[in-house]
Image (spheres, helix red, strand yellow):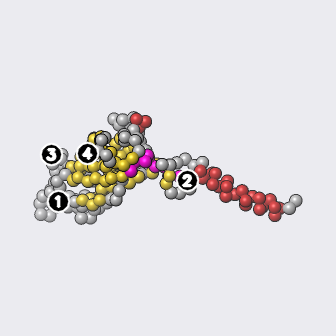
Amino acid sequence: MDTRNTGAAARRFRWPLIALAVLALPAEAVQVALGDELWRHGMTIQAEYLHPLEVLPDSPDPSAADAYLQLNIHAQRSNKQGFIKFSWVPYLTVHYRLQSADGRWSREGVLPPTMASYGPNYGANVRFNGYGRYRASFRIEPPPPDQVRRQVGRQTGVGTWWEPIEVQWEFDYLGPGKKTGVGGSGGY
């Protein structure tokens, strides 16, 4: 038996078999950024969405949502409120408004603080009005002064809370992304 031909045949079928095996891997959720990260009052703010998630205790059923909308807010070195650099900024109230580009459709709500294996965020399952161009607006309110106190002395004091921050992004909603087994993103 000629083993040279069998080895060549095995090499010829190796890559198609590897490609099929990789494509059979389960797809993972991809977080789709709404736009560039913003810097405000010593914080980085990033908005993104991914597939609807099950969130307890009182989240709407993920099957009734189009995406999980989340806002990631982290302290920068320049923050004057005493948050540790790169740490998640807690105690905020985050209001959102989704609006279609033509202004005929909108939805509003609050993004509650939510814990996830990749870190805490402000997020909620939301519905869109189909695929298309949207504007997402967020109002970020500082911690309520009656719930979070500040030291104000010369040695350990921190800066006053900022006025509510308004940020927005325009983006195309094309459905929640999926990471393919062969790299890159697709599934739109």
Residue 104 coordinates in the image, percent (x, y): 30, 41
Q: Which mark is residue 95?
A: 4
Between 72 and 115, the residue placed more toward the observer is 72
Give the SS element for disc 2.
Answer: loop
Type of residue at label 4? His
Measured Cα–Cα span from mark 4 to mark 3: 20 Å
**Badge 4 vs badge 1, beta-carbon distance below 8 Å:** no
Q: Amino acid at mark 3?
A: Asp
Quadrant of the rendering where the N terminus is positioned: bottom right
Q: Nearer the viewer, residue 124 or 103?
A: 103
Tell me where residue 140 appears, x and y as whole percent. Answer: 23, 50
Residue type at tag 2: Gly
Q: Is residue 72 left or right of residue 144?
A: right
Along the horizontal axis of the image, is 180 left or right of 34? right
Q: Is residue 119 visible?
A: no
- Going from the N terminus, do you reach mark 1 or mark 2 first? 1
Q: Nearer the viewer, mark 1 or mark 2?
A: 2
Left/right of residue 71 with respect to residue 148 in the rendered view: right
Range drawn in magenta: 172-181
Q: What kind of element bears circle 3?
A: loop
Which residue bears the numbered disc 1?
158
Expressed as whole percent of the image width and height from the top left, the position of residue 168 reads 28, 53
Dot 1, crowdedness within 10 Å: few (<14), some or many (≥20)? some
Question: Can you identify the residue that label 2 sits on?
Answer: 181
Question: CB atoms at circles 1 and 3 under 8 Å apart?
Answer: no
